[in-house]
Amino acid sequence: MNSSQKGKTPGQSAVVTRYLVMPDQANPSGTAFGGVIMGWIDMVAAMAAQRHCEKEVVTVSCDSINFRSPIYIGDQVILKASVNYVSHTSMEVGVLVTKENPITGKNARATTAHLTFVALDQNKKPTPVIPILPESDNEKRWYKNAELRVKARKELLKKIKLGDHNE
Ligand SMILES: CC(C)(COP(=O)(O)OP(=O)(O)OC[C@H]1O[C@@H](n2cnc3c(N)ncnc32)[C@H](O)[C@@H]1OP(=O)(O)O)[C@@H](O)C(=O)NCCC(=O)NCCS
């Protein structure tokens, strides 16, 4: 596969991986430290973005992260990342984090996140990305939702960029 293609489906670049939560990755109450989960999310999302565009990528923003239920020491953590939407040089990637108790087999959605990555050329400058071609009903829904988020983010950035010292 290479970037001369007209585009790729989200499934062609999706990444699924699994980690075990160890005691040194937990906070004093015995649940996974949020920063560890965020690091895993960034890594798996970056790999999906890179598989899509076949270029160097950098995280430009972590747009949302929702910790929906605690993950415990000994839980297995399954991370699924796929490209939701492509603009010009940037890609929005969605990550679904599921926790699984390996003894009972019980699993539940633990965390969801959206991140934006930018593809870079050999001079480390933003460079265009091939289109994303959503195929399944879910992929089409993720694309439409991501499009709304991307547009809203761009509008917001335009409005606050001039005045806010954090931007
Ligand atoms: C990513 C980076 C190259 C973008 O540079 P830039 O000068 O802002 O480039 P542009 O203004 O041309 O924007 C490039 C794209 O990023 C998007 N973008 C920029 N800031 C953004 C933000 N805060 N949130 C979401 N998207 C953003 C733009 O909308 C544009 O997307 P598009 O081409 O698809 O429309 C630059 O900000 C950078 O190097 N950041 C550091 C990245 C990094 O070190 N990450 C952490 C480790 S991987």
Image (cartoon, rainbow, N blue to C red):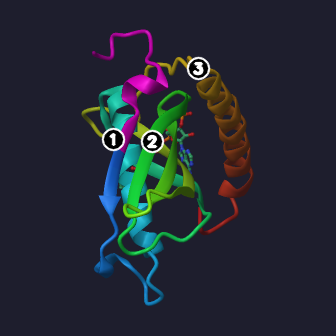
Q: Is residue 167 above or below residue 141?
A: below
Q: Nearer the viewer, mark 3 or mark 2?
A: 3
Residue 17, position in %: x, y?
33, 47
Q: CA distance from mark 3 to mark 2?
A: 16 Å
Q: Is residue 142 above or below residue 12?
A: below
Q: Is residue 55 above or below residue 166?
A: above
Q: CA distance from mark 3 to mark 1?
A: 21 Å
Residue 41, position in %: x, y?
42, 55
Q: Nearer the viewer, residue 66 or 122?
A: 66
* Residue with the most extreme bottom position: 28
Kindly state the secondary structure of the residue where label 2 is placed. strand
**Number of marks:** 3
Asked if the residue at tag 2 contacts the one at tag 1, i.e. Cβ–Cβ closer than 8 Å, the answer is yes
How many neighbours does mark 3 have within 10 angstroms: few (below 14), some (14-19), or many (20 or more)?
few
Q: Which residue is mark 2?
A: 81
Q: Amino acid at mark 1?
A: Met
Q: Which residue is mark 3?
A: 136
Asked if residue 120 shows in the view, the reply is no
In this picture, which residue range is highlighted in magenta? 1-16
Q: Residue at x 32, y 58 (%)?
A: 19
Quadrant containing the C terminus is bottom right
Residue 7's mark?
none
Residue 47's mark?
1
Asked if residue 132 shows in the view, the reply is yes
